[in-house]
């Protein structure tokens, strides 16, 4: 079970540039609502906002601060679709349902854009995203993905970028080509999360920070969620703690693995140098299993991420280690100082597909975003709200996906995953 490091946001570029310092009081009374949402990240806030817009009374409990976990620390990459291959769904459902899942993957990105526009969320939303090929086999895989999107789903939004065109996107000789999509992009994830919290509050959601849900019990009318100083009675409960669910829902926790990922942000590079380095201002990730991902921030810093690990220990000399990785792609940034270095945990499933469902008829959950949480969390919130409002068809599609527990039990699962990740890094070298 992961522990909360402290009750403030971890030091990061995002925390330093957060544009909303609103505090929400802990729950210290007995209250009631239609729905209790547990978790104040993108999943919980999206669910709460969708439900409030449908007329439900909602109370949201957050053990630390809004956006404290992955929602406020991630790379900010807004990537259409899911982390898994589309054929992961094909093994669990007919082609008609796969096409619906595919369409919802595109919807998830449009939903973020709609929220930003509707609620005037200042989060530096920038469009443009490219998956870069490191190896010849990656070139083949990206071309096949584009062709399948067109032939199978009738989608023509991807453009393959040849190697001799790559410098128009990224000033590096490291990549052999890439798949570009104008509809995806990047944003400031903490400011987006804080903007959703403001929108949810304006819609009537009651938000309580520093309120850890300690137990969920049954009542005649539904459920009772208890915290250290208060309790909440609700007809429905939504579990949106993701990597931090821990003992609150052991059956769910066994199906996700907290995977650490780390980021650095350089000093501001200046407009000219930044434009020379990343001419189109697109977000980029590569194709390796242990992938690197990077983008420019609004104030023209290079934000570099990677070093995924199943260990809960932060690497020694994190900034220096991340800087060495960055210089493999951008040796021209050797003189750029590193101003921020931080990390956090994303929640990955065995098959990398999102894990949505019910623990019982009135207890919903969504987890396992596996690196696509900026957009798929919004979809999860919409689908849970639909399901609670008796429109469960789309939500139940995701219930067809088979999810296995991570092997090894509580003590061995992390070491076993570390071995698997070591194997994948070895394969990345070939």
Image (cartoon, rainbow, N blue to C red):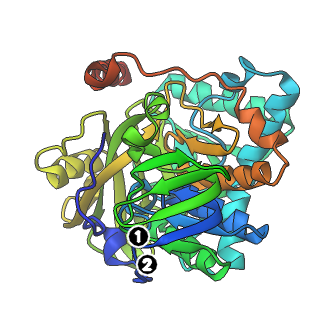
The disc, 1 or 2, on the residue closer to the chain's N-terminal end is 2
Q: Can residue 152 be seen in this view?
A: no
Name the spot of residue 231 as percent of width and height, x first: 47, 62
Within the image, what quadrant is residue 407 found in? top left
335 sits left or right of 41 in the view: left
Is 312 drawn above or below residue 137 in the view shown? below
Crowding around mark 1 (Cα neighbors within 10 Å: few <14, some 14 to 19, many 20+) is: many
Crowding around mark 2 (Cα neighbors within 10 Å: few <14, some 14 to 19, many 20+) is: some
Residue at point 37%, 24% (across, down): 428
Residues 245 and 353: in front is: 245
Q: Can residue 364 be seen in this view?
A: yes
Element on which disc 1 rests: loop
Name the spot of residue 87 as percent of width and height, x first: 69, 23
Label of residue 24 in the image = 2
16 sits left or right of 299 in the view: left
Residue corresponding to mark 1: 209
Name the spot of residue 155 as percent of width and height, x first: 82, 42
Residues 210 and 4: in front is: 210
Residues 306 and 9: in front is: 9
Is 171 drawn above or below residue 204 in the view shown? above
Is 279 drawn above or below residue 86 in the view shown? below
Residue at point 18%, 64% (across, down): 335
Name the spot of residue 310 as percent of width and height, x first: 30, 33
Quarter of the rendering occupied by the C terminus: top left
Within the image, what quadrant is residue 1 found in? top left
The answer to the question of whether label 1 and label 2 lie on touching residues, with beta carbons closer than 8 A, is: yes
Element on which disc 2 rests: loop
Within the image, what quadrant is residue 82 found in? top right
How many badges with numbers are in the image?
A: 2
């Amino acid at each position: 079970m992961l522990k909360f490091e402290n009750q403030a946001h971890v030091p990061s570029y995002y925390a330093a540039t957060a544009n909303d310092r609103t505090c929400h009081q802990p729950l210290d009374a007995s209250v009631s609502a239609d729905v209790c949402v547990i978790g104040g990240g993108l999943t919980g806030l999206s669910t709460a906002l969708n439900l409030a817009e449908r007329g439900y009374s909602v109370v949201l409990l957050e053990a630390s601060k809004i956006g404290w976990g992955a929602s406020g620390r991630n790379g900010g990459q807004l990537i259409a679709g899911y982390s898994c291959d589309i054929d992961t769904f094909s093994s669990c459902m007919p082609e008609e349902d796969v096409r619906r899942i595919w369409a919802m993957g595109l919807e998830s990105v449009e939903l973020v854009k709609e929220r930003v526009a509707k609620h005037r969320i200042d989060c530096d939303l920038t469009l443009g995203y490219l998956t870069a090929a490191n190896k010849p086999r990656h070139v083949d895989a990206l071309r096949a993905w584009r062709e399948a999107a067109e032939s199978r789903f009738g989608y023509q939004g991807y453009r393959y970028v040849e190697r001799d065109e790559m410098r128009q996107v990224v000033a590096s000789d490291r990549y052999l080509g890439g798949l570009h999509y104008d509809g995806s992009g990047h944003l400031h994830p903490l400011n987006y999360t804080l903007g959703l919290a403001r929108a949810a509050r304006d819609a009537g959601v009651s938000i309580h920070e520093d309120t850890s849900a300690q137990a969920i019990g049954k009542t005649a009318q539904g459920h009772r969620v208890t915290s250290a100083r208060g309790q909440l009675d609700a007809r429905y409960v939504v579990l949106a703690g993701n990597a931090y669910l821990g003992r609150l829902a052991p059956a769910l926790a066994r199906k996700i693995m907290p995977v650490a990922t780390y980021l650095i942000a350089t000093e501001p590079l200046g407009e000219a140098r930044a434009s020379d380095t990343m001419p189109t201002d697109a977000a980029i990730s590569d194709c390796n299993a242990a992938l690197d991902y990077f983008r420019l921030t609004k104030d023209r810093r290079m934000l570099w991420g990677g070093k995924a690990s199943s260990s809960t220990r932060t690497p020694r000399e994190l900034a220096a280690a991340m800087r060495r990785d960055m210089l493999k792609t951008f040796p021209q940034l050797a003189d750029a100082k590193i101003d921020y270095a931080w990390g956090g945990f994303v929640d990955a499933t065995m098959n990398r597909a999102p894990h949505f469902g019910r623990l019982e008829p009135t207890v919903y959950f969504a987890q396992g975003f596996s690196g696509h949480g900026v957009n798929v969390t919004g979809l999860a919130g919409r689908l849970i709200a639909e399901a609670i409002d008796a429109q469960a068809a789309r939500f139940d599609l995701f219930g067809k996906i088979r999810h296995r527990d991570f092997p090894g039990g509580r003590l061995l699962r992390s070491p076993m995953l570390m071995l698997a990740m070591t194997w994948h890094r070895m394969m990345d070298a070939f």
